[in-house]
Image (spheres, coloured by chain):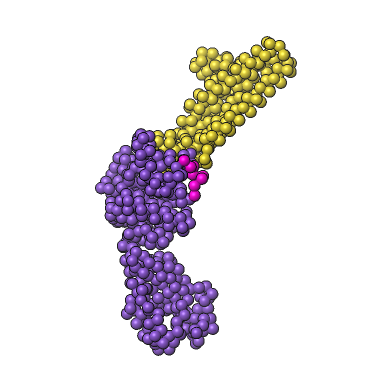
Amino acid sequence: MITFRHVCKNYTTSGSSVLALSDINLHVNAGEIFGIIGKSGAGKSTLIRCANLLEKPTSGEIIVAGQDLTRLSSSDLRQARQKIGMIFQHFNLLSSRNVYDNIALPLELTGHSRKDIAAIIGPLLELTGLADKKNNYLSELSGGQKQRVAIARALANKPHVLLSDEATSALDPETTLSILQLLKNVRDTLNVTILLITHEMSVIKTVSDRVAILQNGVLIEENEVGEFFTHPKTAIAKNFIASSLLQHMPAAIEEHVFTEEQPHTHPVLRLWFLQGTATQPVISELSHQFDFSINILQANVEYIKKHAMGIMIVAIKGEKLKIQPAITYLKQLGVEVEVIGYVPDNIITFT
Amino acid sequence: MSQTTLLLLLNATVETFYMVIFASIFATLVGLPLGVILYTSRKNNILEHPYLHQLLAALVNMTRSIPFIILMVAMIPITRWIVGTSIGTNAAIVPLSVAAIPFIARIVENAILEVDRGLIEAATAMGATAWQIISKILIPEALPGITNGLTLTIISLVGYSAMAGAVGGGGLGDLAIRYGYQRFDVKIMLMTIVIMIVLVQVTQWLGDKLAKQFSKGR
């Protein structure tokens, strides 16, 4: 439904040229929710704004619903844009209009009669849960409700594609979840293809079918979301996953940790339970087979689609000679292990 | 108060009304589109045209830097060409309009500058034409600001119209000069001042009410 072919974007500011997007190749299938994640400044916004040509690429093709947008005349481009909905981080709604009239705006632009507009907006208000708010002005709405209005507005002209530019970044976690749920619902009921950008892994986890990482204007890793989380290929992908699973050592312990082994210290391991290993009783096996005492310092298990995955930080007390075989054993089970330091035995207790 | 004085005052008030209202209408008819073009022709805007913007901005600044009393006198040939005479209320409307046009243009431009750029972006993404963006987004969103600005302009025009009276334009200013100043008629002088004050108060009140109506729900 959306295809980027060799898309590049250069900005020239005061003589120097900045490469915002470099040779982007991307294909989003019809009916799919595709998420692009990246840190701020990675070029996400530029990329999604290329998908409706709000940003003109320096070179390359952008094909949406079979049309190469870069080759369209300005009036054809306007028509193509009517079939590409977009929602924004700051909603971009008109304060001079109430909810109903905001949703009606794109329909007025395409010359629908009042009667047609009413017939279209009714179901949209139901879908977005705004039926009782239709006469309210924006100042009377919460952030989540405003984004719902924006979603209804973006859907008014029955678009093939919905672009979501950090649509949940200004919302609290609970509201974010309800908006993402709505997006999923929109895809399921209206079969709209959704391309979204975000800097939050939780958004990708909750709603995306496929995901790609954008870093410094380059698309790095593209995968189905379950695969992406359980078999990350690049260090950047791993970092994103780790940051979404909060895997840092508790600060009170971290400040005492040595990087090299010292007398009276115990190794601290970071265990990655990626390939379905999070459902196995790995820790108790470790304790039985090698006679270790294990102190769990930090742990987090999450479910993405059907995959369970997690990260755990543990300190181990046991015979030194058995530690290497234990690591080998864990690796055989599919658990990735890193020794991230050594903690003195007066800091943590094994009882 | 004699009936003649009353008639004089009434007549002058109607003349002032006439001048101010028509000058406001003409100035808005030209100033509003001019302000919109000043905004939209800015760099990176929907009808980007930097040279046009600079030309119009220079023209607006030029007109605004001429004191009204000088503008009025300097414009006499043009006024005569348009109205056929340079004396009377009809003639006064020409310089009054010309003086108010750049004022209104800047007010409109500034009011639209306050509109969030994200709205233009959203409308562009919907496939709106430049005209649709102007008529459905920019002007409605900027309407409270434009209304406040127009109120300010109309009040200034009440003052200017009194000046126009001094050179044969008629209206309250003319009355105040001829009777109040030249004939030492303090009563008429005071009456004209009171009427002016009331005019300005009523205009401001109406303007505020209208602006409030337009910003309903914000």
A139 magenta-colored? yes
Residue B86 seen in this snapshot: yes
- What is the drawing colour of chain A? purple
Q: Is residue A215 visible?
A: no
Identified at 33% across, 69% down, the residue is A231
- Is A128 or A14 nearer to us in this picture? A128
| Chain part drawn in magenta | A135-142
The quarter of the rendered structure image containing the N terminus of chain B is top right
The answer to if A249 sits in the magenta stretch is: no
Q: Residue at x 36, y 55 (%)?
A: A184
Toward the viewer: A68 or A210? A210
* Chain B, colour shown: yellow
Q: Position of residue B184 (x, y in %)?
A: 74, 16
Image coordinates for residue A279, horizontal then vertical, percent: 36, 74
Residue A21 occupies which quadrant of the picture? bottom left
Prevailing SS of the magenta stretch: loop
